[in-house]
């Protein structure tokens, strides 16, 4: 057997070592080239020394185009004059994008090499911006809701299920002579004249356990100065996301002054309900003008149909209350940007019956028409609408008119779940629904309008 010389052993070991080094280098390069992050190295002079595959995809350069060039070719700031500005990536085409970058230094012999791991965070930044916009929009809605409640001309109170006052507006405070801070936490019934407390407590119990209707009754309050305040009260349950009664909303009208006319009482109620309708619409329509536009457009359609002036005057005030029942729909459903689930849509549909219940039982022609519109404006000519599935002439004419006005305004204005349609696209879609969704005669009157005059 031939003996292996020391030289041969050395050569074999060197060959094995070179092979191992080659494999290690190939493995390291494979990892470097296939990691998701862009990996860029630079020497002490800031010149780019390596540029992996992810970096080439991210920045749009070939490796040959960047080797030896400074890092500032691909990394800059949105404001070069601000030393604290966040770094951004710059593509070959000059466009910039937000990045997240981790940097470390390693010693390679006597050289210091900087390794930068870079990732594009455009989607994350966009999501954060969208969440911030939604939070700001929600804050604006809350502020508008609070302003509408606080500035309402009729006394308004929100209590817990057992009648403990949680929120009260200035009109009610003025009515009975107490500051809001004195009323919060007290029991609503305790403010009542002693002789009226049993009946008041009974109504609170009914609303709390069977909150499907608005309960209207008269009672007396004891003012802070001892005098008696006669009032008319409408109490309605507010349900939580699970459909359970969580709070009670009461509207309180001071009827002590016998000289107050029936029309003044009616107008005060309508104004409060209109404000409630606006609160609901602010969550669908950022301008809050949907209710007014529907009222104006409904009157314009009614004029083309030849309705009497007195009926048009009622329609102008009643139509804006069509969606007052949305006050009972949770924000998570009403403001949902995506498609509603079947359960959510069923909950949304209840705004018609809830709105009708809120407006029912007044005896005033205006509120009776408002109740009728709230209940029927989602019925369809072919019977496929809700809540009752009425068809044809069984749907009151006011409901048929508002159905057209409401759909046109909803289509042509932005909502949380859709962008605004052009007028032409909206008219084409509605014309296609003649005899199905809409009364053909009402739709013909609508299509004959000069819409710019009523928009």
Image (spheres, rainbow, N blue to C red):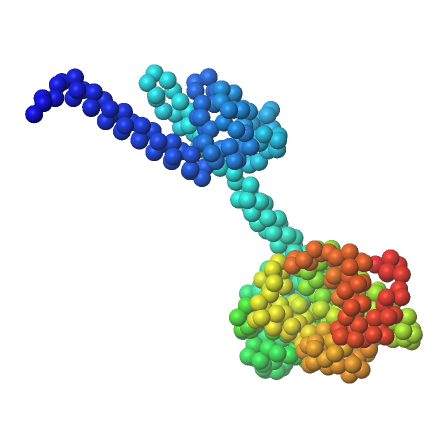
Q: Point out residue 2 in the picture as x, y percentages from the top left corner.
A: 9, 23
Q: Quadrant of residue 319?
A: bottom right
Please identify the quadrant where the C terminus is shown: bottom right
Residue 171 shows up from this direction = no
Number of marks in the rendered image: 0
- Compared with 20, 276 (above or below) is below
- Compared with 194, 410 (above or below) is above
Q: Point out residue 377 in the picture as x, y percentages from the top left corner.
A: 74, 73
- Compared with 15, 409 (above or below) is below
The residue lying at 51 percent from left, 24 percent from top is 64
The residue lying at 32 percent from left, 18 percent from top is 109
Q: Is residue 431 left or right of residue 104?
A: right
Residues 299 and 174: in front is: 299
Q: Quadrant of residue 332?
A: bottom right
Q: Is residue 81 left or right of residue 281?
A: left
Residues 338 and 406: in front is: 338
Q: Point out residue 347 in the picture as x, y percentages from the top left corner.
A: 60, 71
Q: Point out residue 372 in the picture as x, y percentages from the top left corner.
A: 76, 78
The residue lying at 80 percent from left, 72 percent from top is 434
Please identify the quadrant where the N terminus is shown: top left
Residue, far front: 1
Residues 172 and 37: in front is: 37
The residue lying at 80 percent from left, 82 percent from top is 393
Residue, far left: 1
Residue 298 shows up from this direction = yes
């Amino acid at each position: 057997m031939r003996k292996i010389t020391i030289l041969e052993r050395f050569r074999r070991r060197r060959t094995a070592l070179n092979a191992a080094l080659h494999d290690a280098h190939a493995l390291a390069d494979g990892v470097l080239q296939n990691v998701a992050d862009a990996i860029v190295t630079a020497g002490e002079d800031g010149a780019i020394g390596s540029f992996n595959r992810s970096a080439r995809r991210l920045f749009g350069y070939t490796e040959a185009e960047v080797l030896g060039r400074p890092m500032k070719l691909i990394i800059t700031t949105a404001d070069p004059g601000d030393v604290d500005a966040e770094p951004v990536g710059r593509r070959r085409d000059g466009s910039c994008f937000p990045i997240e970058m981790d940097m470390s230094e390693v010693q390679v012999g006597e050289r210091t090499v900087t390794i930068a791991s870079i990732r594009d965070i455009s989607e994350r930044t966009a999501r954060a911006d969208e969440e911030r916009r939604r939070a700001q929009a929600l804050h604006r809605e809350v502020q508008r809701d609070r302003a509408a409640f606080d500035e309402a001309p009729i006394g308004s109170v929100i209590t817990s299920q057992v009648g403990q006052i949680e929120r009260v507006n200035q009109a009610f405070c003025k009515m009975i002579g107490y500051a809001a801070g004195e009323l919060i936490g007290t029991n609503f019934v305790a403010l009542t004249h002693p002789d009226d407390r049993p009946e008041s407590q009974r109504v609170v119990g009914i609303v709390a356990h069977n909150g499907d209707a608005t309960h209207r009754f008269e009672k007396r309050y004891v003012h802070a100065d001892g005098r008696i305040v006669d009032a008319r009260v409408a109490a309605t349950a507010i349900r939580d996301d699970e459909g359970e009664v969580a709070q009670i909303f009461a509207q309180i009208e001071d009827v002590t002054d016998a000289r107050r006319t029936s029309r003044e009482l009616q107008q005060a109620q309508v104004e409060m309900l209109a404000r409630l309708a606006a609160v609901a619409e602010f969550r669908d329509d950022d301008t809050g003008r949907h209710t007014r536009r529907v009222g104006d457009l409904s009157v314009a359609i009614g004029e083309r149909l030849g309705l009497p002036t007195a009926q048009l005057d009622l329609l102008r005030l009643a139509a804006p209350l069509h969606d007052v029942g949305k006050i009972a729909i949770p924000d998570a459903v009403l403001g949902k940007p995506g498609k509603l689930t079947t359960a959510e849509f069923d909950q949304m549909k209840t705004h018609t019956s809830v709105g009708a219940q809120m407006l029912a039982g007044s005896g005033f022609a205006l509120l009776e028409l408002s109740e009728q519109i709230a209940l029927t404006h989602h019925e369809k000519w072919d019977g496929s609408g809700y809540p009752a599935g009425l068809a044809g002439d069984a749907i009151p004419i006011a409901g048929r008119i508002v159905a057209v006005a409401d759909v046109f305004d909803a289509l042509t204005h932005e909502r949380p779940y859709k962008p605004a349609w052009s007028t032409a696209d909206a008219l084409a879609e509605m014309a296609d629904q003649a005899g199905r969704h809409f009364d053909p005669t009402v739709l013909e009157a609508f299509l004959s309008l000069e819409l710019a005059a009523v928009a």
